[in-house]
């Protein structure tokens, strides 16, 4: 089976993939355009894409050789799953491998933003730190605060556990379906508005896609209030970035911690200029063992496909 992997992987992952399939690894920074994605599906039996590869509806033309898109990552809103299904192409993802690492980044953003860690580091690196002062860089105490989690799937639950057990935080959450049998105290609120009004930190952990695009806009940010902080580790377009910039500039909310961006990899210059915003370059799963585990999860789906077995992580 001929396989295209659209980015370089860890050494361990590339060895494992190459031992099983005839693999071409692309060494590039930019994702595939829809035209390039279409050509890849004509040239290869399977494709292992990543975030940024645009498998839009227009990519699924005629004479496609590909029968599986084994996505590297849990999120797959860059793939038109319905168009793939119409073309007879299955789609899989790598859900469990990303959970704990992504939850860790959410807590990193909460702590960095609340305690002004990025601002403090920049101050020190500029050589402007004059020593400890009782009122210097006073931030927000995280322990005992209320966190509101939007989306209580695997990652949302992992974030909630860290917040409760690690920092004694009260946990509120909003989810499209009823969540029961949690192993920690948490309260599911009926509507998003209630969560936004009642949370010191709002963490977005929903899937990307048309159903969640601009879920958080000007109205929602206004409901949070001037003492609240927004954390996004989901997909960039879940937040209306222009509305977020305006809310931060006006003091509508206290700050934001972001690992994803609406027009990634482009980041708003206004966000970059703000001291009350923590910005990370999509580090959610950026640990070698995690990225290798993601590739191995994708490999499991590729092997299942090659052997004619059901895909363990089929999403379409």
Image (cartoon, rainbow, N blue to C red):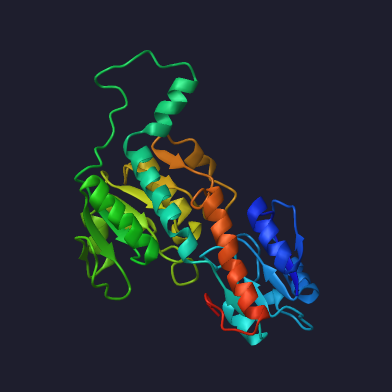
Quadrant in the rendering for residue 77: bottom right
The image quarter containing residue 234 is: bottom left
Q: Residue at x 22, y 42 (%)?
A: 143
Q: Nearer the viewer, residue 236 or 132?
A: 132
The answer to which image quadrant residue 157 occupies is bottom left
Residue 202 visible (yes or no): yes
Q: Is residue 304 above or below residue 188?
A: below
State the residue in front, 222 or 185: 185
Q: Residue furthest front?
A: 19
Residue 33 shows in the view: no
| 284 displayed left or right of 65 | left
Query: Residue shown at 69%/80% (left/top)?
Result: 67
Residue 313 coordinates in the image, percent (x, y): 52, 75
Q: Quadrant of the C terminus?
A: bottom right
Give the quarter of the figure containing the N terminus.
bottom right
Query: Residue 45, image x and y in percent?
Result: 74, 76
Residue 312 in the image: above or below residue 230: below
Position above or below: 201 against 62 = above
**The one of 11 and 200 positioned closer to us in this rendering:** 11
Left or right? Give the position of 38 relative to 49.
right
Q: Nearer the viewer, residue 3 or 269?
A: 3
**In the rendering, at what x and y percent does residue 260 appear?**
50, 52
Q: Is residue 1 above or below residue 228?
A: below
Q: Residue at x 23, y 60 (%)?
A: 172
Query: Could you say where residue 74 lies in the image, as x and y percent from the top left?
Result: 51, 65
Residue for point 68% across, 85% down? 87
Residue, far top? 130
């Amino acid at each position: 089976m001929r396989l295209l992997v659209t980015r370089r992987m860890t050494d361990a992952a590339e060895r494992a993939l190459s031992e099983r399939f005839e693999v071409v690894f692309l060494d590039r920074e930019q994702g595939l355009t829809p035209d390039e994605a279409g050509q890849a599906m004509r040239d290869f039996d399977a494709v292992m894409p990543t975030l940024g590869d645009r498998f839009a509806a227009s990519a699924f033309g005629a004479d496609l050789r590909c029968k599986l898109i084994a996505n590297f990552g849990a999120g797959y809103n860059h793939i038109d799953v319905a168009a793939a299904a119409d073309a007879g192409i299955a789609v899989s993802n790598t859900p469990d491998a990303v959970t704990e690492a992504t939850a860790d980044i959410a807590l990193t953003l909460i702590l960095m933003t609340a305690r002004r860690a990025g601002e403090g580091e920049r101050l020190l690196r500029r050589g402007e730190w004059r020593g400890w002062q009782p009122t210097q860089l006073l931030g927000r105490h995280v322990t005992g605060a209320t966190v509101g989690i939007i989306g209580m799937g695997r990652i949302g639950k992992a974030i909630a556990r860290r917040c409760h057990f690690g920092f004694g935080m009260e946990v509120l959450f909003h989810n499209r379906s009823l969540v029961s049998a949690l192993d920690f105290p948490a309260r599911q609120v009926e509507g998003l508005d209630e969560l936004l009004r009642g949370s010191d930190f709002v963490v977005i952990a929903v899937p990307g896609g048309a159903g969640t695009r601009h879920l958080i806009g000007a109205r929602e940010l206004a409901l949070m209030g001037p003492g609240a902080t927004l954390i996004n580790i989901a997909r960039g377009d879940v937040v209306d970035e222009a509305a977020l910039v305006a809310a931060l500039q006006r003091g509508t909310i206290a700050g934001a911690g972001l690992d994803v961006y609406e027009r990634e990899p482009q980041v708003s210059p206004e966000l970059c200029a703000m001291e009350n915003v923590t910005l990370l370059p999509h580090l959610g799963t950026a640990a070698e063992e995690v990225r290798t585990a993601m590739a191995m999860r994708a490999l499991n789906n590729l092997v299942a496909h090659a052997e004619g077995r059901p895909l363990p992580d089929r999403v379409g």
